[in-house]
Image: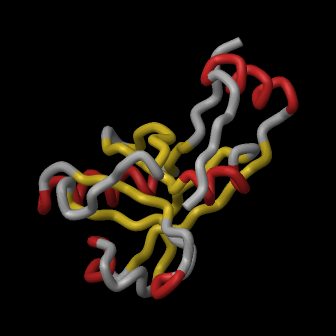
């Protein structure tokens, strides 16, 4: 079985990522866990946000890496993230804010077979908190 990606993007999101990368260079996404900007996919110029041991690389969208904090991943590990774009104001630190649109995370639950394949491929899920 081919492994399902943990994160995918809609055509609209891919088009926006392409525009943002043309303006800003290499990008990095991080699924925010809340606080000031709520829970939203945040888009940064690569290097503006430092990722570390408490972040999990879920994959790439539009050729750009997409991370999530391990504590949040513990709750979302059974789901595939689907990054979309909708009209409105995004997070104040996210690059798409000036475009009049914002990235939005939708999701779907992996099937039992998909989840088992991911766990087998990634190894036992060892999550650290704090």
- Residue 122 in the image: above or below residue 1: below
Colour pattern of the rendering: secondary structure
What residue do we see at 55% from left, 77% from top?
34
Give the residue displayed 36% in from the left and 49% down from the top: 52
Residue drawn at (43%, 75%), measured in percent from left and top?
102
Residue 103: x and y in percent read 46, 68
Residue 33 position by quadrant: bottom right
The x, y position of residue 60, in whole percent, is 41, 39
In the rendered view, would you say 81 is above or below 95?
above
How many marks on residues?
A: 0
Say which quadrant the C terminus sits in.
bottom right
Judge whether 62 appears above or below 99 on screen: above
Picture coordinates of residue 77, whole percent (x, y): 69, 45
Which quadrant of the figure contains the N terminus?
top right
The image position of residue 28, as x and y in percent, is 30, 53
In depth, the one of 29 and 121 nearer the eye is 121
- Point 58% across, 63% down: residue: 105
Most extreme residue toward the top, as rendered? Answer: 1
């Amino acid at each position: 079985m081919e492994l399902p990606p943990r994160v995918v993007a809609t055509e609209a999101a891919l088009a926006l990522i392409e525009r943002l990368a043309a303006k800003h260079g290499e990008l990095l996404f991080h699924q925010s866990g809340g606080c000031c900007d709520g829970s939203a996919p945040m888009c940064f110029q690569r290097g503006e946000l430092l990722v570390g041991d408490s972040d999990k690389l879920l994959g790439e969208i539009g050729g750009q890496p997409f991370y999530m904090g391990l504590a949040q991943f513990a709750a979302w590990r059974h789901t595939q993230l689907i990054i979309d774009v909708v009209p409105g104001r995004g997070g104040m630190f996210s690059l798409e804010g000036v475009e009049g649109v914002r990235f939005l995370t939708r999701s779907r639950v992996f099937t039992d077979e998909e989840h088992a394949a991911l766990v087998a491929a990634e190894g036992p899920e060892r999550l650290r908190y704090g």
